[in-house]
Amino acid sequence: MKKINFKISYHNGDARDGRLDMYDATVSLQGFAKALSITTHALLNDGEIKKHGNKISGAKLYINPSRKGSFEELITLAIENQAALAVGTSVVGAVFYDLIKWTWSKTLDLNYSPETAQVRKLEDRIEPFIGEMEEALEIPLEQAHRPIKQCDDMTIVIKRPRNPDHVIKMDKETLKSVSIQTEPNVITNITGNVTRYNILSGIGRFYDNELERTVSFKMPEKAGSSQRRRITWSLHNAQDEGEGKIRLEVKRVVSAKGVIRRYLVQKVYRI
C-alpha cells in the first residue's frame, strides 16, 4: 500500500478562529471527497470516469484529525492498485498532483498544462477525456466552494506536506466558474467541425467557426442514429480542409463568468 498525504486548508472568515459552520463544512468536504474520488479513480483505471464519485477502485481516502488552532483537514490517499504499487510513491504522487492540477484547473478556468507523461497521455487521447472530467467535476467542486458562498474573502487551498506551493487554490472567482446554468433559448446556425467524440458518452469537442476555438458538446441520450452519424461524419472528415462542416442547434451551458462551458446539442445538420 502506498500513501499520499495532503492538506485541505480553509483561510479567512470563521476559519481564522479554527472553525466553520457545520453545514457548510460538511457540504464542502463532501464535494472534495467526490472530486478526489472521481480524479483518483481515473488515475488508477486508465482514464475511466465515474461521475458519481462514491468509490475509488484501487484506493481509499481517509480523513485525519484536524490540527488545533486552524481549520485544516489532513487527507490520506491509500493506494492499493497493483499497477500503481509497481512504481515509487514519489512517482505516483507526482502523477496524482499533476492530474488534479490539470483537470481541476480546466474546470475552474485556471491555466495549467500537464507535466507528467502519464497525464499528457490522457490529454492526447482521441476521446474527449477532459470534457467528460469537467462535466463530472463541476458539481463536486461547486459543493467544495460552499464556505466561500457565505464569506467571499475565504480561500481554500490544497497543499502537499512540507511544500509551500499550493496544488489548487479556490476563491470567489473560481466559484463563478462552477456556478453554471443552462440558457433556455436554442441558438441556431452554430457552424464548424467535430474534433473529438466519444460515441458512448455522447461528449465531444467542436471547433466553432465564429468563436474560433473548440467548445465541449454533449449529444442527448435520445438522439437519433442519423444525428449521431452526422457527428461522426464530421469527425472523420475534419482532417480535410473545408470538409466535415456541420451546423448545430444548441442550448448553451454558461458559467457565472459568462464563459461557455458546453453546448447541449438539439439538432445536427450537414452543410
Image (tube, rainbow, N blue to C red):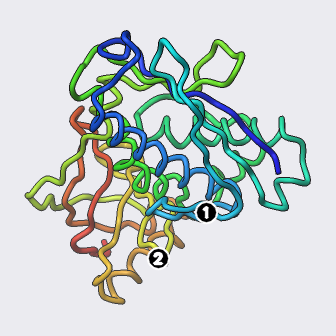
Q: Which amino acid does the dot numbered 2 rest on?
A: Thr
Specify the quadrant that holds the C terminus. bottom left
Residue 120 picture location, percent across and down = 70, 45
Q: Is residue 122 above or below residue 29?
A: below
In contact (CB < 8 Å): disc 1 and disc 2: no
Judging from the image, what secondary structure is the residue with disc 1 in? loop
Q: Earlier in the sequence, mark 1 or mark 2?
A: 1
Residue under label 2, please give it. 232
Q: Camera-side residue: 119 or 269?
A: 119
Q: Residues within 10 Å of mark 2 (few under 14, many from 20)?
A: some
Q: Is residue 59 above or below residue 151?
A: below
Disc 1 and disc 2: Cα gap in Å? 13 Å
Residue 169 picture location, percent across and down = 47, 23
In the image, what residue occupies the spot 39% across and 48% down?
140
Outermost residue to the left: 185
In the image, what residue occupies the spot 27% across and 32% down?
176
Q: Is residue 192 left or right of residue 196?
A: left
Q: Camera-side residue: 263 or 245?
A: 263
The label on residue 126 is 1
Q: Is residue 249 left or right of residue 83?
A: left
Residue 212 picture location, percent across and down = 37, 43
In the image, what residue occupies the spot 30% across and 34% down?
22
Residue 59 picture location, percent across and down = 69, 56
Q: Camera-side residue: 28 or 214?
A: 28
Q: Residues within 10 Å of mark 1 (few under 14, many from 20)?
A: few
Q: Where, by quadrant of the figure, is residue 113 drawn?
A: top right
Judging from the image, what secondary structure is the residue with disc 2 in? helix
Q: Is residue 99 left or right of residue 191?
A: right
Q: Camera-side residue: 22 or 44?
A: 22
Q: Where, by quadrant of the figure, is residue 98 drawn?
A: top right
Q: Which amino acid does the dot numbered 1 rest on?
A: Ile
Q: Where, by quadrant of the figure, is residue 58 drawn?
A: bottom right
